[in-house]
Image (cartoon, rainbow, N blue to C red):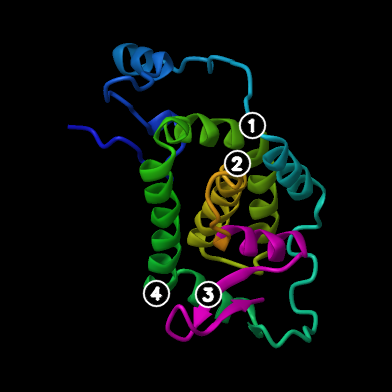
């Protein structure tokens, strides 16, 4: 049986066969013919809060303040790309981000089941509006060789995508982990890990 939601995969690889769910005609046609099919356009139904966050992402100077001094005792300042990459691809950081994603989805499923059914649609819309900007920022960093890990790009895409999902459901559940990461991305920084054992400790930022 297919899982009900696969939160972090792009729309082209998600399949929802659960009762009352959404079946992708594009995916069906592609699997049947093997030929690429143009995406089916539909109306975007994101909240103003999500559109506002996407607009901020689109106008920010991505990673523009990397390496500049920080005077913020609430975080741990990272000193180099090497340290930032090592931290962002660590299993510990991946598990923290996964736990926070699951915390959001579990709350939605328990308290706002009908709204939770929109999860994949929200991700589709966010990807359509935001991912070209994020992809361009990632390519620029990788091209300059300041960061060399392809995992870096996956981390940034997932963080920004889920910050928008968090914004979309912010009027229903109060979870702000990815919103905190978003603030640092928009500030031209790179939130890349956690020092200490949660719920204690501090966010690591380059």
Q: Give the residue displayed 37% in from the left and 42% down from the top.
A: 109
Disc number for residue 46: 1
Residue receiving disc 4: 92
Residues 122 and 29: in front is 122
In which quadrant of the rendered view does residue 23 lie?
top left
Residue receiving disc 3: 193
Of callouts 1 and 4, the N-terminal one: 1
Q: CA distance from mark 1 to mark 3?
A: 29 Å
Of callouts 1 and 2, the N-terminal one: 1
Q: Which residues are magenta?
A: 178-206
From the viewer's perspective, tell me whether residue 170 is left or right of residue 89.
right
Of callouts 3 and 4, the N-terminal one: 4
Count residues near mark 3 (Cα–Cα under 10 Å), then give few for <14, some for 14-19, many for 20+. many
As helix, strand or loop, the secondary structure at mark 4 comes to helix
Count residues near mark 1 (Cα–Cα under 10 Å), then give few for <14, some for 14-19, many for 20+. some
Disc number for residue 168: 2
> Hey, which residue is sitting farthest front in the picture?
111
Residue 175, position as x, y percentages in the image: 54, 57
Kindly check if marks 3 and 4 are in contact, taking CB atoms under 8 A apart as contact: yes
Is residue 23 depicted above or below 129 in this figure?
Answer: above
Residues 95 and 46: in front is 46
Residues 6 and 140: in front is 6
Is residue 13 depicted above or below 44 in this figure?
Answer: below
From the viewer's perspective, tell me whether residue 205 is left or right of residue 21.
right
As helix, strand or loop, the secondary structure at mark 3 comes to strand
Residue 184, position as x, y percentages in the image: 70, 66
Count residues near mark 2 (Cα–Cα under 10 Å), then give few for <14, some for 14-19, many for 20+. many
In which quadrant of the rendered view does residue 129 lie?
top right
As helix, strand or loop, the secondary structure at mark 1 comes to loop
Q: CA distance from mark 2 to mark 4?
A: 27 Å
Whether residue 56 is in magenta: the answer is no
């Amino acid at each position: 049986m297919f899982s009900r939601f696969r939160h972090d995969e792009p729309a082209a690889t998600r399949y929802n066969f659960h009762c009352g769910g959404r079946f992708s005609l594009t995916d069906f046609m592609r699997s049947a013919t093997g030929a690429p099919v143009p995406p089916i356009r539909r109306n975007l139904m994101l909240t103003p809060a999500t559109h506002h966050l996407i607009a901020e992402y689109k106008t920010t100077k991505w990673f523009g303040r990397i390496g500049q001094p920080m005077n913020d005792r609430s975080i741990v300042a990272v000193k180099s790309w090497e340290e930032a990459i090592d931290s962002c691809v660590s299993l510990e950081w991946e598990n923290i981000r996964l736990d926070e994603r699951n915390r959001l989805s579990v709350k939605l499923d328990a308290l706002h089941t009908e709204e939770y059914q929109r999860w994949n649609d929200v991700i589709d819309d966010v990807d359509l509006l935001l991912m070209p900007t994020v992809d361009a920022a990632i390519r620029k960093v990788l091209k300059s060789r300041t960061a060399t890990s392809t995992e870096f790009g996956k981390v940034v895409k997932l963080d920004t995508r889920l910050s928008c999902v968090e914004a979309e459901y912010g009027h229903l559940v109060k979870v702000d982990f990815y919103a905190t990461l978003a603030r640092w991305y928009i500030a031209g920084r790179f939130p890349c890990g956690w020092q200490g054992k949660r719920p204690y400790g501090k966010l690591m930022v380059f």
